[in-house]
């Protein structure tokens, strides 16, 4: 059994922590400081903090993980391993050198593809057919450490980022257990990443979700899937933000016979709104107008009195 200090912040981190509890000794959990969120700026804890406290684990939230004070505090745990999963901060060499064995990181992609903050989203947005997780021995650079092991899964045709995150979370927890077992048995074989194959997954911004009907139907469909649950793909309809939450490509190998992108081809009660794009047609199935509940695209069309030939923008 390894003595572990765990570092994590997001929902993706929880499955890893959950898997490690009971198999190894969790000395402490480090997570990001609480942030003020919402209209009333109420203090909000990270998902990992909430989960750790429910499981009676010691939680710490230093503002600077690389400070001299935090460095000394981390040394006091006399940990075998630091395990890092979606923590949100790059570690200094001084921190990386603290544990007896390694500082390891679970990343939600098959590295070196999609280094960075949004690997799951970018995999879907770019139409990847395969995703996975990688366990690396960390260095001072973002997601560039030597690879200990990888696990892969197929991305389903209509899978969105949230459902893929749940699958990778479970896969990642098991990958960490396997990696730690290799460390315990001194069977680790590290493989350097090929930087020539690296792609960067930039941090998502709300404006990234804005749909351009000039794009191909398949590209827009991937955008919709990739931005669930945040920031969501959207358009502006009559100057109001309209989230497009579920779509399907229909006839993506067929050039449009209409003159205008964003034009409604037809409205079908059992399906939704079929819209023209730069290439191919896109079926809108679920939408949400700002301040309203999620509804079917057909109900939206009826409520707004949309008809064939209208431009939905």
Image (tube, rainbow, N blue to C red):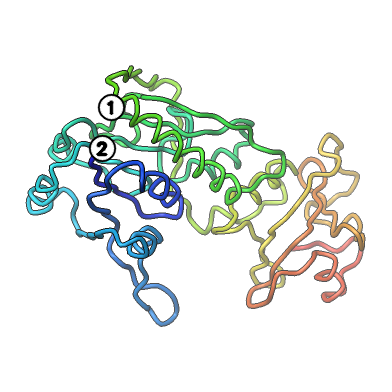
**Marks 1 and 2, how far apart at CA:** 8 Å
Q: Residues within 10 Å of mark 1 (few under 14, many from 20)?
A: some
Asked whether the beta carbons under mark 1 and mark 2 sit within 8 Å of each other, the answer is yes
Q: Which residue is mark 1?
A: 184
Res. 98 mark = none
Residue at (47% x, 45% y) in the render: 118
Residue at (75% x, 52% y) in the render: 247
Mark before the other along the chain sequence, 1 or 2: 2
Q: Which residue is mark 2?
A: 2
Residue at (29% x, 22% y) in the render: 185
* Along the viewing direction, whichever of 89 and 249 lies nearer the viewer: 89
Q: Residues within 10 Å of mark 2 (few under 14, many from 20)?
A: some
Say what secondary structure mark 2 lies in. loop
Residue at (91% x, 57% y) in the render: 266
**Residue reaching furthest to the bottom:** 40
Against 283, residue 23 (above or below) is: above
């Amino acid at each position: 059994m390894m003595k572990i200090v765990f570092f994590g912040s997001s929902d993706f981190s929880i499955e890893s922590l959950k898997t490690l509890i009971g198999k190894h000794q969790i000395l402490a959990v480090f997570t990001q400081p609480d942030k003020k969120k919402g209209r009333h700026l109420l203090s909000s804890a990270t998902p990992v903090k909430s989960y750790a406290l429910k499981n009676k684990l010691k939680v710490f939230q230093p503002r600077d993980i690389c400070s001299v004070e935090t460095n000394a505090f981390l040394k006091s745990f006399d940990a075998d391993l630091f395990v890092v999963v979606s923590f949100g901060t790059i570690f200094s060499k001084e921190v990386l050198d603290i544990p007896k064995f390694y500082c390891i990181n679970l990343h939600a992609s098959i590295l070196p593809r999609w280094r960075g903050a949004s690997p799951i989203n970018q995999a879907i947005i770019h139409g990847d057919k395969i995703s996975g997780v990688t366990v690396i021995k960390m260095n001072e650079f973002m997601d560039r450490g030597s690879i200990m092991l990888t696990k892969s899964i197929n991305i389903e045709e209509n899978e969105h980022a949230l459902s893929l995150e749940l699958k990778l979370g479970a896969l990642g927890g098991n990958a960490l257990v396997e990696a730690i077992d290799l460390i315990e048995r001194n069977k680790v074989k590290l493989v350097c990443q090929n930087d020539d194959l690296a792609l960067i997954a930039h941090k998502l911004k709300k404006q990234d979700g804005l749909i351009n009907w000039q794009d191909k139907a398949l590209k827009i469909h991937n955008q919709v899937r990739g931005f669930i649950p945040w920031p969501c793909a959207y358009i502006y309809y009559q100057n109001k933000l309209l989230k497009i939450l579920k779509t399907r490509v229909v006839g993506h190998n067929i050039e449009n016979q209409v003159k205008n992108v964003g034009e409604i081809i037809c409205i079908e009660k059992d399906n939704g709104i079929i819209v023209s794009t730069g290439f191919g047609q896109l079926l809108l199935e679920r939408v949400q107008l700002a301040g309203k509940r999620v509804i079917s695209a057909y109900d939206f069309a009826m409520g707004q009195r949309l008809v064939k030939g209208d431009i939905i923008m």
